[in-house]
Image (cartoon, grey):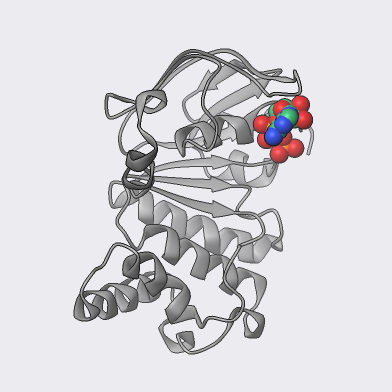
Amino acid sequence: MIEMQDVYMTYPNGVVALNGLNVKIKTGEFVYIVGPSGAGKSTFTKMLFREVVPTTGKVLIQGVDTSKLKWKEVPYHRRNIGVVYQDFRLLPKLTVYENIAFALEVIEESPKNIRKRVMEVLDLVGLKNKARFIPDELSGGEQQRVAIARAIVNRPGILIADEPTGNLDPETSWEIMQILEEINASGTTVLMATHSKEIVNAVKKRVIAIEDGIIVRDEHRGEYGYEA
Ligand SMILES: Nc1ncnc2c1ncn2[C@@H]1O[C@H](COP(=O)(O)OP(=O)(O)OP(=O)(O)O)[C@@H](O)[C@H]1O
């Protein structure tokens, strides 16, 4: 369970990004976060990853208050949260395999387990045959699939996708959606911030709309609700 209680967030420059946010997201849900540019969607997702800490209020993940985590506990907290970005953020000099294995090497998994798990996630995203390629040799959709594989390789309970289809053409975007749905079907909570009206209206899920730092709409099987 993810829970935000009366969350306010003011950045050091005085911008109020979240303005009294309350929400509960159950384990295993798939939620779209929508809203105009600058509404606070990224701040919302960054708070889960503990990239930002609320000015006041509480962010609880499985009952743990993230603002009470000590610095040395933050990496452990983050292991339960995979993140995928619009611009993929792969390491350009490493192969597909190495980009994914890296996430397991830092937690000191055995080489045998690393190999098994990396091939498992590459299979899930349909890229087993491209393990030795470097990111530049892949299409945008393939790079995003690698980024998804890397995000889930640790089996996190939560996957945050911040505009995962923002740089992709429609057909490739549907493929990415299928993968996210599969990951969700295996029990992972998925939060996807998006501006894609087509996807939100076609692949029906819970929709949380944020405007000016508050939730203005929260609907099961909701609509995008804005002009594209
Ligand atoms: N590091 C920061 N320092 C100061 N202000 C910030 C910072 N990050 C975001 N903001 C401001 O906080 C507000 C919310 O930003 P946020 O990135 O959460 O919006 P968003 O809904 O994700 O927007 P977009 O759809 O354009 O990605 C905006 O006014 C933004 O300018």
Q: Position of residue 181 (x, y in %)?
A: 42, 52
Q: Position of residue 94 (x, y in %)?
A: 53, 81
**Residue 2 in the image, given as x and y percentages of width and height:** 37, 28
Left or right for 203, reference 66:
right
**Residue 165 coordinates in the image, percent (x, y):** 64, 55
Q: Residue at x 51, y 83 (%)?
A: 95
Along the line of sight, the residue nearer the viewer: 188 or 44: 44
Tell me the quarter of the picture where residue 4 sits: top left
Quadrant position of the C terminus in the picture: top right
Q: Can residue 121 be seen in this view?
A: yes
Q: In this view, does 89 lie above or below 2?
A: below
In the rendered view, tell whether residue 86 sits above or below residue 45. Answer: below
Q: Residue furthest right?
A: 227
Q: Can residue 38 be seen in this view?
A: no
Q: How many labels does the image show?
A: 0
The residue at 20%/75% (across/down) is 110
Q: Which of 165 and 200 is in front in this view?
A: 165
- Side (left or right) of 141 relative to 150: right
Q: Within the displayed image, which quadrant is ligand 1 positioned in?
A: top right
**184 or 122, which is in the foreground?**
122
Q: In which quarter of the image is the N terminus?
A: top left
Task: Kindly indicate the quadrant of the structure image that contains residue 103.
Answer: bottom left
Identify the residue at horizontal 24%, vertical 80% (top origin): 111
- Tell me where residue 223 sits by quadrant: top right
Q: Nearer the viewer, residue 171 or 102?
A: 102
Q: Which residue is drawn at 35% across and 65% down?
A: 106
